[in-house]
Amino acid sequence: MPASFPEDEFRAFGIAASHFFPDLISDEALLDPLEKRRHFDWSWAAVRYRYRSCAECNDEFRQLLDNPSEMWQAGWGDEEMSYRLERCIYIFFMSALSIFDSFAFGLHFMGNAIQPAAFPDVASPRNITRGVTQKAMQAAFPNDALTSLLGSLASDARFKAVDQIRNLLGHRISGRRSVRCSSTLNKDGSYSTDFHEETWHIPGAAGKLVFDRDLLQRHLDDVTALLSLLAGAARAFAESHQPVKPSP
């Protein structure tokens, strides 16, 4: 995993949450028609996989801009370069939103293991969304920090940027490089640059994506910060709701 991933907190969360489920090789787990343990484990793993995809796309994006084609450097269109950059942007934002969707999906199954009646959609996994999980958490654990964090995602500017771009990219290519500039002709015949701006133009998106080698890194930093908060809160939640062991 990339060094920026909140490994310690997230792994501790996974370990604590595993105590709510029967052992993988137990009859209870193997004969569970809803495969609740497997759903949780695989959504936990999906958070890691999607984050790694984001980091790898960021690295590839930077490498492309560090070694551009001659056509790209000259300011001409280069369809192959555009495709490779667009692919990085597309996979990054699709994976970035999936991090939080997968996290919420797993929380729904963990919540069901603690209070089954409050999390009934384990029987219909397709119905589980961030919103559905947040409402269930609000009803079952209204005062928990994890519930508050999950509910605040939708209004967080960092998350909203990822969510909006991802929803646009799900239906078309991400965009194109856009260059705007102006210059002044000097008396000696030379030109002075007054203004130069490069963006990745995404029609319908609020704001601008500054087009440079850190375009994806800035969003990866935001995703990391949000995920770190959620992982820490999820760990605290799981550890504070551990099932009571039966007396010998």
Image (cartoon, rainbow, N blue to C red):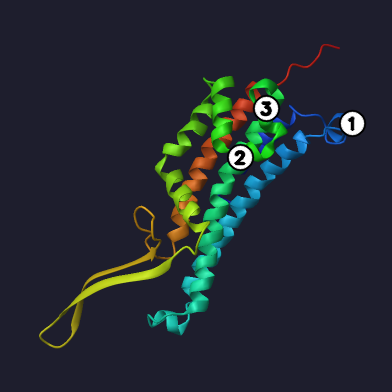
Q: CA distance from mark 1 to mark 3?
A: 22 Å
Specify which label sits upstream in the sequence, 3 or 2: 2
Instruction: Determine the residue positioned at 58% across, 46% down.
Output: 99
Residue 182, given in percent of the width and then of the height, sits at 22, 74
Please state if 110 lies on the left or on the right of 87 as rendered. right
For marks 1 and 3, the one nearer the N-term is: 1
Numbered disc 2: secondary structure:
helix
| For residue 64, above or below residue 18 | below
Mark 1: give few (<14), some (14-19) or many (20+) Cα within 10 Å. Answer: few
Q: Is residue 6 visible from the viewing direction of this image?
A: no
Circle 1: element type: helix
The amino acid sitting under disc 3 is Pro
User: Residue at the location (57% across, 26% down)?
Assistant: 137
Mark 2 and mark 1 residues within 8 Å of each other at the beta carbon: no
User: Disc 2 to disc 1, how far (Cα)?
Assistant: 27 Å
Which mark, by number, is residue 27? 1
- List x then y, in percent, for residue 199: 36, 65
Dot 1 and dot 3 residues touching (CB under 8 Å)? no
Q: Is residue 57 above or below residue 103?
A: below
Q: Which residue, given by chain and number where applicable, does mark 2 sit on?
A: 103
Image quadrant in which you'd find residue 20: top right
Q: Which residue is most to the left? A: 187
The residue that disc 3 covers is 120
Given this view, does label 1 or label 3 mark the residue nearer the observer?
A: 3
Q: Position of residue 86 (x, y in %)?
A: 50, 67
